[in-house]
Amino acid sequence: MQAIESSVPSLVGIDWFIIASYFFILIGFGIWLGRGQRDARDYFLGGRDLPWWGVALSILATETSALTFIGVPAMAYAGDLGFMQIVLGYAVGRVLLAFLMVQYYFKNEIYSPYALIGLAFGPSAQKIGALFFLVAGTLGAGVRVYVTCIPLQLLLGWSVSTSILFFVVLSLVYTWFGGIKSVVWTDSIQFVLLFIGGVFVFFYIPSLIEGGWSAAFDQAYEAGKLSWLNFDFSFAEPYNFWMGIIGAVVFVFFTHGIDQLVAQRVLACRSVDDGRKALLFCGVSILPMMLLFLVVGVMLWVYYQSASIPIEIPQNSMGKNQIDYIFPIFMLAETPVGIRGLLFVGIFAAAMSSVSSALSALASVSIMDLGLLGKIQDESAKLKWSRHATLFWGVVLIIVAYLTREEESVMDAAFSLVGLTSGALLGGVVLSLLIKRGPAWPVVLGMITSLFGMIWINSLELVHWPWYTLIGFCLMLIVALPLLRLVKRPPKVRGLTQ
């Protein structure tokens, strides 16, 4: 990473004061929220006593994260508003999930959706599902962690490894003490900060452009930067309507129905109705949120048509520009003193939300779904080992994040990695709800087939990631469903209830 030119403004005293105050207050608040925890249920589900609106804000913080604050503007800067077709599918998927899936979470005392697979097909199928999530969840979260190091590279010239270590350790502190309760409430605060930062930049950039809003949108329109609707069907890039209304809807069935990163928060709600309210709120909110940051990216493009980029955008080892640096460069070079510190707090907030959410989800699945606490009866011991699992996954995220530093676009990388196993997991849960009971081996075989099939499809680079979940889901059902129907169910024993 090249050093920042001396002519480019850097953070000053008030900016650093704002950032330091944020870190101290947030970590202190997260630790304080962890008081009074008695067992793993408190640690991973918050005692199932969290209000729906807090859960909704936490979900928004998790799904937007640093990928939205940095990655989404970069996508629009390099392209257009086509990603809104995917966001439309996101909204539709959340609404459908609110009515189709949430009620199943509250029928049993479960800690993750993968427990539904275990209830239908036995513990071996549940463990395979948990392992699939742990692998894909770690890879996807690692990319999210990596993007957090971009601001620190710009500000301090820190190395990738030092920057990653900084964010993971800070997030680990309050997640270790407070569990999901700390994650939800700190995420809620961080979402508000992220949103405020986005709104400020949305109004600020046009003030730097000659002619203001009108001239900026005219230039963007003439260059095709405001295009967003594409009805040409394709499995490859660019984004299209069918990719959003079909592929993205199925993808959301995984991310918000099956992926523990979000499902854990729904499970922490007080009731089915509260869980539905949380998802419906997210469905309504995601459209203006993503549009906000996409337009910010378009405005950045317009601005830099007449202004030079003060810091050279780094290139990866393949010689491609890492466009995710463009928004942090603008914030550092062009925004006012004080406001600059608040904007970087927005990035840090998004970053820490990503890390803490991943830590809590990975720890809960590894402990509860893999049955690592099965022989431990003492509740305080379960709580202790749950915290140890959180620490373990913090170390893993540091390693994975470092290995993903060569990606050209963190958005595509994160979603592609998650898509390798998302279809298999979605298929497992759907079969558990439809078939109700059966042997584990057809489900396990279907999930493994889906995984290897998606690895092969990903290697071809002919299919874009919004289709991954649907394709993986179909592969899983094609293998597992016929086998489950061929296997004879054990005969009912007279005189016994089923």
Image: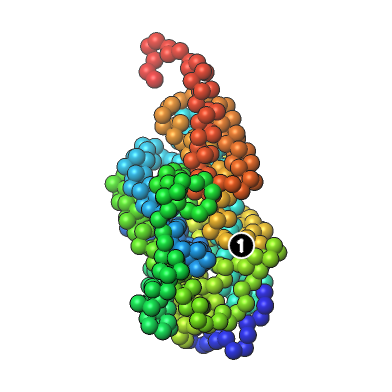
The relative height of residue 20 versus residue 361 in the rendered view (above or below) is: below
Asked whether the viewer can see residue 204, the reply is no
Most distant residue in the left direction: 273
Asked whether the viewer can see residue 304, the reply is yes
The relative height of residue 23 versus residue 75 in the rendered view (above or below) is: below
Identify which amino acid the numbered label 1 is placed on. Glu
What color scheme is it? Answer: rainbow
Counting from the top left corner in percent of width and height, residue 112 is at 46, 43
Describe the element under mark 1 as helix, strand or loop.
Answer: loop
**Residue for point 54% across, 72% down:** 326
Is residue 92 toward the left or the right of residue 157 in the image? left
Most distant residue in the right direction: 317
Counting from the top left corner in percent of width and height, residue 16 is at 52, 82
Graded by Cα atoms within 10 Å as few (under 14), some (14 to 19) or many (20 or more), the crowding at tag 1 reads some
Q: Which residue is mark 1?
A: 408
Is residue 141 toward the left or the right of residue 197 in the image? right
**Residue for point 66% across, 81% down:** 3
Is residue 390 toward the left or the right of residue 271 in the image? right
Q: Nearer the viewer, residue 297 or 93?
A: 297
Counting from the top left corner in percent of width and height, residue 460 is at 63, 45
The mark total stands at 1
Most distant residue in the top direction: 494
Image quadrant where one finds the N terminus: bottom right
**Residue for point 61% across, 73% down:** 313
Q: Nearer the viewer, residue 421 or 265?
A: 421
**Residue for point 65% across, 65% down:** 320
The relative height of residue 19 versus residue 393 in the rendered view (above or below) is: below
Image quadrant where one finds the C terminus: top left
Residue 339 falls in which quadrant of the image?
A: bottom left
Counting from the top left corner in percent of width and height, residue 367 is at 55, 45
Residue 220 falls in which quadrant of the image?
A: bottom left
